Image: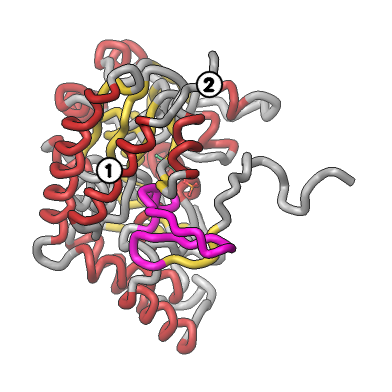
Amino acid sequence: MTITPLMPVYPRSPVRPVRGEGAYLYGEQGEKYLDFASGIAVNLLGHGHPHLTKKIQDQAATLMHVSNMYGSPQGEHFAQRIVDNSFADTVFFTNSGAEAVECAIKTARRYQFANGHPERTKLISFSAAFHGRTLGTISATASEKMREGFEPLLPGFEVVEFDNLDAADAAVDETTAGFLVEPVQGEGGIRPASNAFMQGLRALCDANGLMLVLDEVQCGYGRTGTYFAYEQYDIEPDILAAAKGIGGGFPLGACLATEEAASGMVVGTHGSTYGGNPLAMAAGEAVLDVILEPGFFEHVREMGDRLRGALEQMLPNHDHLFEGVRGRGLMLGIKMKSDCKPFVLHLREKGLLTVAAADDVVRVLPPLNIEESHIAEFVEGLSAAARDYEAPEA
Ligand SMILES: *Cc1c(COP(=O)(O)O)cnc(C)c1O
């Protein structure tokens, strides 16, 4: 037997965290890491946040799970708060990002079906996108790595070039249900769409009766400095998938929709056993309590500007390694001149956690409640790591 008890689909790293405190993680031997990965944009409030921890503890002791067959005062309350703070009129809770995207895809198709267009089943998605690992969500991407060996995938998807409005326009035909797009691509390398592109997609949807479906699983929930990233594009979607930060580390996702867009989602059309159970709702409410405090998003923007500014100053000192920095708020990417993975490993050895994306982009995704001291520590560490880094021979 050589297979590991944990199915070996991840290249496990020597970092083996057993405890977390704020922006720091601690390994089995007490090694300390500055966590600017946040479980891939999940731990919005860092580790062990007292309000989040307390709410989860209290709810676990009160009522952890009941079936969605019953009324959910906890779900109603949390959904109402999301509705009050976003474009949405209604919310479906899931356990993960991929399930939130699945619900978004189903809602879009079902809208067309319920409104006299059962032939409109195709979602147009974009190059370098990431929407999750279910059969549906890998069908919406062009990535060979994610698709190979899992075919046949679902029909009803077409992938065109990201941020190219003409390509999106040209792909619309009588079978199109809508667009599925990340306003800021995460796994694809921290690439924000342009205003013209996002506003153009909105206009195409309005002109053709299509659904604009946003995947804000990574870029939403305060990460880019507003509750959702679409706010910065002066548009509103019809449907939106959220997850990652929404539970601050508790597995939770959500599919948000307008009343119109959800018009096909009637009793019996969708469901989830765990989705939105009282424990998950308590985690979600606790995160929302904190991020809706006055000044929180401002803090994210301010820290984002500072971090970006510090990186912009430091990176040119190592211009054989780095091309530059991009992104929004505290969703930043450092573009390297070669494969970033060995450098991300080198940073780990120095006690700095980041995430590789799209081969050559180091993702910097700190908790949203970091302070200036964390930024200084990160940038100093990064600079020192760059000084003694020797890129492996290509
Ligand atoms: C992480 C991610 C997903 C999938 O979320 P899971 O919780 O891993 O299923 C979907 N879309 C985007 C943009 C993501 O970053």
* Scheme by which the image is coloured: secondary structure
In the image, residue 265 lies in the stretch drawn in magenta = no
Identity, as a three-letter code, of the amino acid under mark 2:
Pro
Disc 2 marks which residue? Answer: 392
The magenta region covers 21-43
Q: Residue at x 43, y 55 (%)?
A: 33
Ligand 1 lies in which image quarter? top left
Q: Residues within 10 Å of mark 2 (few under 14, many from 20)?
A: few
Q: Which residue is mark 1?
A: 380
As drawn, is 276 to the left or to the right of 320? right
Question: Looking at the picture, how far across and down is residue 79, in whole percent?
Answer: 30, 65
Direction from residue 61 to residue 12 in the image, left or right:
right
Can you give x and y, in whole percent of width and height, for residue 347 in the image? 43, 40
Quadrant where the C terminus is found in the figure = top right
The image shows residue 140 at horizontal and vertical percentages of 48, 29
Element class at badge 2: loop
